[in-house]
Image (cartoon, rainbow, N blue to C red):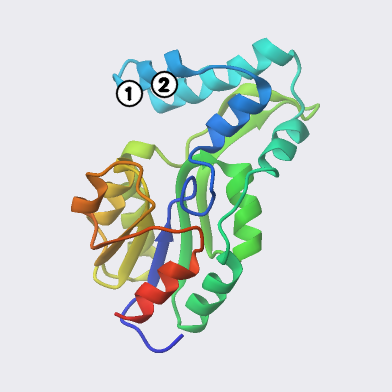
Amino acid sequence: MGKTKFKLAVFDMDGVLTQAPSSWEFVHRELGVDNQNNLSLYRNGDLTYMEFLRSDVELWIEKMGTVPSKLIIDILGKVPLRAGITETMISLRRGGIETAIISGGIYWLAERIGKIGEFGEIHANKIKTNGNGEIIPDGTVMVDPKRKDLILRDLQKRIGVSEEETFSVGDTLQDVALFRHSGYSIAFNPNEHSMTKNATVTLKGNDLRLVLEQIQKQ
């Protein structure tokens, strides 16, 4: 990749780096549980994100009894990824661009993708376990999906990068918070039409190298 004005690339995970729109929903489907009631409560503001996280994990425990973390990690290992992640990240790094994941998804999946793409930073939400390696209804919220901008702005400050030197990639309205603090924003297979109005450009496809090609034009 040639010289570019960008110094930081920020990616949402679910629906951008993965073909599955939600890592949480992917696990729900695999375990045969329904979190629609919890989701409605969260969207209506009746649950904090931590409460939402706990309620989702409780569904798994109620269905399965004890749930080894390995089971969830193995399920997340089945999540189909976008093509071109490794190649895109290698090219970005060669161009002197720092890379980061900022996601409300599950950290174990972000960790898997982080290793594949050798991302510089990973910000996602962690599920806690007990001493036997079994999940418990608790976690660490690194990213409130409604306030991804807080993570981005802190990252920009820490590494000394301006908004104009940042580009971000997302697919849902929750990613607009990233777009507002990025000099260039890409709606990648957006799940809502209004995303197009909030992004610099919209791309559709199953290969992350589309993002790379777009950035190389800038």
Q: Which residue is drawn at 48% across and 55% down?
A: 101
Coordinates of residue 196 in the picture (x, y in percent): 24, 52
Which amino acid type is marked by label 1? Arg
Coordinates of residue 209 in the picture (x, y in percent): 49, 70
Coordinates of residue 8 in the picture (x, y in percent): 39, 69
Tell me whether circle 2 and circle 1 mark residues in contact (CB < 8 Å).
yes
Q: Is residue 187 above or below residue 126?
A: below
Q: Residue at x 61, y 55 (%)?
A: 113
Q: Which residue is drawn at 71% across and 39% down?
A: 73
Coordinates of residue 100 in the picture (x, y in percent): 47, 60
For the question of whether residue 7 can be seen, the reply is no
Q: On the rendered structure, is 122 left or right of 31?
A: left
Residue 26 sits in quarter: top right
Q: On the rendered structure, is 169 left or right of 105?
A: left
Residue 39: give its label: 2
- Secondary element under disc 1, as helix, strand or loop, is helix
Location of mark 1 (residue): 43
Q: Is residue 118 above or below residue 42?
A: below
